[in-house]
Image (cartoon, rainbow, N blue to C red):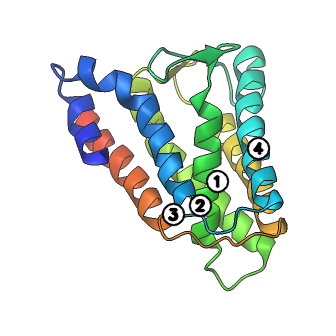
Amino acid sequence: MYLAGVIGLQVEVLQPFFRPLIPLNLLSSLGLLLLFHTDWNRSFLLYCLTAFLVGFFVEVAGVHTGLIFGSYQYGPALGWKLWEVPLVIGNNWLMLTYACGSVCDRLPAPAWTKAIVGAALMVGLDILIEPVAIHLDFWSWNTPAIPLQNYVAWYVVSALLLLLFYRLPFIKTNKLAPLLLLLQFFFFGLSTLFIFW
């Protein structure tokens, strides 16, 4: 699915067929990740709801004020919007924080250290996401360059969600999480090479 996306979204004649599938890809990725989760208790459901809502509403605030990530707006590529923010954005925050949290849980370190490393992993991925997202009209910036503020805000929001992830009592191990995260880096890294080559 990710390999097909790299090809389909970079070959101009295929883009009309692949662009409408972007929200479906994000939803199915989260669905598969959750399928491999083994501890469906109230704490995990609380995390899912919190990560989705915080991720979505921080983007709503960001789009309408420009005070969080910088001044930007979403394009049509990510599907249906509410308050000018695609609904799958909450899905994306949940998927990425959960995947990063699960991967970093393997570190022999306290929860706060895992959250710091996980947030850095999130920012590293966002650095790869940004040029691809702009090229594919996921979103666009109202400034000549992507503001540093964007990466700082990504880090802070991610770290807070990951701290909650580690504090809530549920099993963090997910066999699919490392592969999904690797596929995210693969997709955006390879897409970036195609865009700038």
Say whether marks 3 and 2 touch (CB < 8 Å). no
Rate crowding at label 2 as few (under 14), some (14 to 19) or many (20 or more) other CA atoms within 10 Å. Answer: many
Indicate which label's residue lies in the foreground, 3 or 2.
3
Residue picked out by circle 3: 177
Q: Closer to the N terminus: mark 1 or mark 4?
A: 4
The residue depicted at 65 percent of the width and 13 percent of the height is 84
Residue picked out by circle 4: 49
Q: Which mark is residue 74?
A: none
Rate crowding at label 3 as few (under 14), some (14 to 19) or many (20 or more) other CA atoms within 10 Å. Answer: many
Cα separation, mark 1 vs mark 4, equals: 12 Å
Is any atom of residue 147 visible in this view?
no
Say whether marks 2 and 1 touch (CB < 8 Å). yes
SS assignment at label 1: helix
Indicate which label's residue lies in the foreground, 1 or 3.
3
Cα separation, mark 1 vs mark 3, equals: 10 Å
Q: Position of residue 5 (x, y in %)?
A: 28, 38
Q: Looking at the picture, which amino acid does disc 3 mark?
A: Ala
Cα separation, mark 2 vs mark 4, equals: 17 Å
Q: Looking at the picture, which amino acid does disc 4 mark?
A: Leu
Say whether marks 1 and 3 touch (CB < 8 Å). no
The residue depicted at 17 percent of the width and 27 percent of the height is 11
Say whether marks 2 and 4 touch (CB < 8 Å). no
23 or 137: nearer the viewer = 23
Residue picked out by circle 2: 100
Q: Looking at the picture, which amino acid does disc 2 mark?
A: Cys
Quadrant where the C terminus sits is: top left
Residue picked out by circle 1: 97
